[in-house]
Image (tube, rainbow, N blue to C red):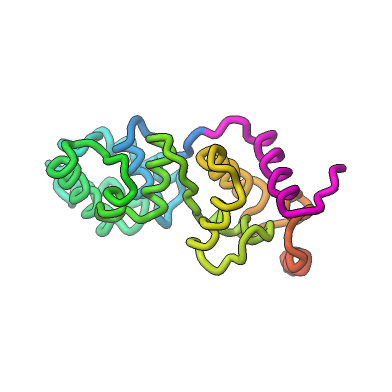
Amino acid sequence: MIELKTKADRVHWVMDELESLYPETPVPLDHTDAYTLLVAVLLSAQCTDARVNTVTPALFELADNPRDMMRQSVEDIRQIIRPCGLSPRKSAAISELSRILVEQHGGDVPQDFDALEALPGVGHKTAAVVMSQAFGVPAFPVDTHIHRLMHRWNFTNGKSVEQTERDAKRLFPEERWNKLHLQIIFYGREYSPARGWSLEKDYISARIGRKSLWKKASDYASK
């Protein structure tokens, strides 16, 4: 077994392990272009990707581009996306951002962080997903899985998502960001979930994680 003496050693080992586990990283949200990805990511807030993927076929049959979407009533959009939760807010955001894309961006999704984050319902994480996965711009979107694992692996102090993103960008090479953030998500879902978690299965955390994890793991086991 390779000795991991430094944080750099641990970072490289994690990247190698994740590449071995997940050589292919398909985007979990079904989409056909930057616009449908943007809408799908917006819908995924406080909703699972799997559920979003059951909703978007009907939504994109109704309208799969900004010009058609802005012509739909907010209520028609809301009725379709209700299973995703927060449907009043999300339906209004989808309608309004579609209008803005047509009126201010020629119907295209802008390849710009500031312009994306200015759209209704679009925060920094959503913008980062679109920039990285639709346009190939290096970004490191931090979701709950990445935030949890970066803390478990002692790569960040876990005090905020913003700090976790800064630490991830500092530790990992930029050319790996777009693939690596998906690999960490996949690992988190399969090996290191928030609930039902075990160090016996989560072998990366067992090898390099902060020492306090062992107490937490025993607490999980005793429940």
The image quarter containing residue 195 is: bottom right
Picture residue at 29% right of the left edge, 38% below the top: 35
Picture residue at 22% right of the left edge, 35% below the top: 65
Left or right, residue 48 beside residue 157:
left
> Is residue 140 visible from the viewing direction of this image?
yes
Which of the two residues, 164 or 66, is positioned nearer the viewer here?
164
- Relative height, residue 33 to residue 192 (above, below): above
Picture residue at 55% right of the left edge, 34% below the top: 25
Left or right, residue 107 beside residue 165:
left
Quadrant in which the N terminus appears: top right
* Image location (x, y in percent) of residue 144: 52, 57
Picture residue at 54% right of the left edge, 51% below the top: 169
Quadrant in which the C terminus appears: bottom right
The image quarter containing residue 137 is: top left
Left or right, residue 124 beside residue 80:
right
Which of the two residues, 173 or 177, is positioned nearer the viewer here?
173
Find the magenta span and give its range. 1-25
The tally of labels here is: 0
